[in-house]
């Protein structure tokens, strides 16, 4: 018997069971269903439960958006048990958006099955489950059905907020103040008590732990600075820079998310209370800096600058506006106190001397930045981010190094260009570099006392003169290796030099017998020349004439005339 053909099913077959997953919809837990039931029952009983307290005068409905919405809500409220009317109202495309969302929510309240809910997600206001009905905005429906959530219920009035109307919501109340941001005192105090800064209440307002009531009342500057905020209800607030750096949760959003629109500058003003160390108490800060700080604080209160950055930004804007004197990080010195400025920098005296010479060469102000760059400033102010001489000298060396070499060591451009280039490349510690250079220049100055220029004498007398010069500069040991590398009379003079200094044991094999014999005859004369040179160069007890006489005796022993070339 032939089998019946297998039944074939095609996609879309209505008889085939399919599981379809819809985004944004989920099965509601019992807890969610209970919460929605409480909210919707209260809404159905009194739709005006979603309304804020009106703390302003309303206009005509055709001119005032809030008055128009309130009238629309009254109409929907009167029809809240008419499901057929609500079904039509909630899908209309025109008219008031709040009342349309309310109609859909009231229709949902009349239903019995709330097991499937939609999920509303908002980065700022959080997540919420609600029953989506009609064409009302998701945020509006979520706000209505979660009207007990003090933050989420603000979203119902987002369109009004865009038109410049203000709403304030907290756990103890909900207020509408019209187009003027009159923050209720209860809202301000509740917001500050719940802020992430852990503020303490004082007799003069609220303050962080490091701001005492005396500081808050007197507005006395602190070393690191603090922010003074004044709310339009009269509440005062003081926050230190350290507290803003340490908070994990942002401070301004914790306040702003309780109002709509979230414009904290509309309800509070802020002031940066700080001045650089050393700045006279009776001298006002530059107006330009004060204005720049005011702008930065408005940006911070608008959540465009994070808590951890605002203090440093305010300090830098004040510092960048100062157009006189010296600034070492956050310390100010007057134009007459260059010494105090230099002494505030880490470094040696020779580094401070070098920096002072560079400052004398500046035709305008300069700002040496922490990243190793600098920029010229039109005003006569010297500002440095690093409180140490070395990084400042490194930054200014390329442009001002040649002037420093000329003024400090009398080095001309031909000689100084190589020194300048080497130091710019290796960036040796400036203290050591300057000391070595000064010692070297001191040796050069002393060597100029000798009667002849280097290499101006005939050999081997010039070699003897070179050995004395080099031993004064670098020590006798530094000259030993060069003695055995010579030939003829120079090698004989080298042997005599080793004998004078008892250095013959290890290098004797390098010299031939003829050089040893001849050099041995010169030892007494070279000894006298060396002693005259040391006495002249080191302590000045001898005279150039004594060195000349000793050289002439050595020249006679060598059979070489000093006057020959």
Image: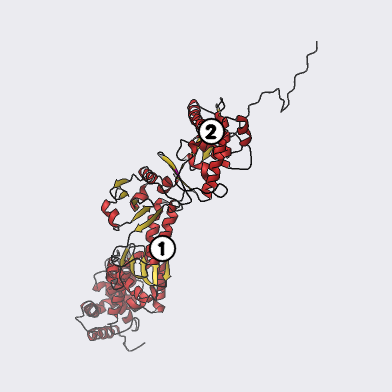
**Residue 513, quarter of the rendered image:** bottom left
- Secondary structure under tag 1 reads helix
Q: Label 1 crowding class (10 Å Cα cut-off): few <14, some 14-19, many 20+?
A: some
Residue at the spot 26% in from the left edge and 76% down from the top edge: 520
Identify residue for label 2. Answer: 130
Q: Nearer the viewer, residue 484 or 218?
A: 218
> Does 20 appear above or below 358?
above
Q: Which residues are magenta?
A: 175-180
Residue 447 figure quarter: bottom left
**In the image: residue 177, left or right of residue 443:** right
> On the image, numbered disc 1 is attached to which residue?
291
Q: Which residue is depicted at the point 35% across and 54% down?
A: 227
Q: Quadrant of residue 113?
A: top right
Q: For residue 176: magenta? A: yes
Judge depth for marks 2 and 1 and give the one in front.
2
Figure quadrant of the C terminus: bottom left
What predominant SS class does the magenta segment belong to? strand
Residue 157 image position (x, y, % from top left): 52, 43
- Observer able to see residue 511: no
Q: Is residue 156 magenta?
A: no
Question: Number of numbered discs present?
Answer: 2
Question: Is 457 drawn above or below residue 33 in the view shown?
Answer: below
Residue nearer the viewer, 124 or 68: 68
């Amino acid at each position: 018997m032939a089998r019946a053909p297998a039944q074939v099913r095609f996609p879309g077959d209505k008889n085939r069971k399919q599981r379809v997953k819809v985004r944004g919809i989920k099965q509601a837990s019992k807890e969610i269903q209970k919460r929605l039931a409480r909210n919707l029952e209260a809404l159905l009983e009194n739709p005006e439960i979603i309304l804020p307290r009106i703390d302003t005068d309303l206009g005509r409905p055709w001119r005032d958006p809030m008055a128009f919405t309130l009238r629309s809500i009254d109409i929907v409220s009167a029809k809240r048990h008419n499901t057929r009317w609500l079904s039509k109202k909630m899908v209309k495309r025109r008219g008031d958006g709040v009342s349309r969302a309310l109609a859909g929510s009231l229709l949902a309240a009349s239903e019995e099955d709330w097991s499937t809910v939609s999920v509303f997600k908002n980065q700022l206001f959080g997540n919420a489950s609600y029953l989506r009905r009609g064409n009302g905005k998701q945020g509006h429906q979520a706000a209505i059905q979660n009207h007990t959530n003090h933050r989420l219920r603000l979203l119902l009035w987002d369109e009004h907020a865009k038109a410049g109307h203000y709403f304030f919501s907290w756990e103890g109340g909900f207020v509408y103040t019209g187009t003027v941001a009159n923050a209720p005192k209860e809202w301000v105090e509740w917001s500050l008590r719940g802020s992430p800064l852990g503020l303490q209440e004082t007799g003069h307002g609220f303050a962080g732990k490091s701001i005492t009531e005396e500081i808050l009342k007197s507005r006395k500057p602190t070393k690191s600075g603090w922010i003074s905020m004044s709310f339009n209800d009269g509440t005062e607030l003081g926050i230190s820079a350290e507290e803003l750096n340490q908070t994990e949760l942002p401070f301004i959003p914790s306040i702003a998310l309780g109002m709509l629109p979230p414009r904290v500058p509309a309800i509070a003003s802020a002031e940066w209370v700080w001045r650089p160390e050393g700045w006279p108490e009776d001298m006002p800060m530059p107006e330009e800096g004060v204005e720049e700080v005011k702008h930065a604080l408005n940006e911070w209160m608008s959540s465009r600058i994070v808590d951890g950055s605002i203090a440093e930004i305010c300090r830098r804007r004040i510092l960048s506006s100062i157009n006189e004197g010296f600034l070492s990080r956050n310390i100010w010195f007057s134009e007459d106190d260059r010494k105090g400025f230099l002494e505030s920098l880490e470094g040696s005296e020779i580094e401070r001397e070098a920096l002072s010479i560079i400052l004398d060469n500046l035709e305008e102000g300069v700002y040496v930045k922490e990243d190793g760059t600098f920029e010229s400033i039109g005003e006569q102010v010297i500002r440095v981010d690093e409180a140490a001489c070395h990084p400042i000298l490194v930054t200014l060396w390329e442009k001002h190094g040649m002037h420093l070499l000329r003024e400090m060591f009398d080095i001309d451009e031909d000689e100084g260009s190589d020194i300048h280039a080497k130091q710019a490349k290796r960036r040796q510690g400036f203290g050591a570099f300057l000391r070595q250079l000064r010692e070297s220049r001191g040796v050069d100055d002393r060597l100029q006392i000798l009667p002849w220029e280097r290499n101006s004498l005939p050999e081997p007398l010039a070699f003897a003169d070179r050995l004395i010069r080099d031993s004064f500069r670098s020590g006798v040991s530094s000259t030993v290796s060069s003695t055995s590398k010579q030939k003829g009379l120079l090698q004989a003079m080298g042997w005599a030099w080793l004998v004078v200094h008892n250095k013959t044991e290890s290098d004797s094999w390098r010299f031939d017998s003829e050089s040893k014999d001849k050099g041995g005859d010169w030892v007494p004369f070279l000894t006298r020349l060396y002693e005259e040179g040391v006495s002249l160069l080191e302590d000045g007890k001898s005279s150039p004439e004594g060195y000349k006489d000793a050289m002439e005796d050595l020249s006679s022993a060598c059979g070489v005339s000093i006057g020959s070339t």
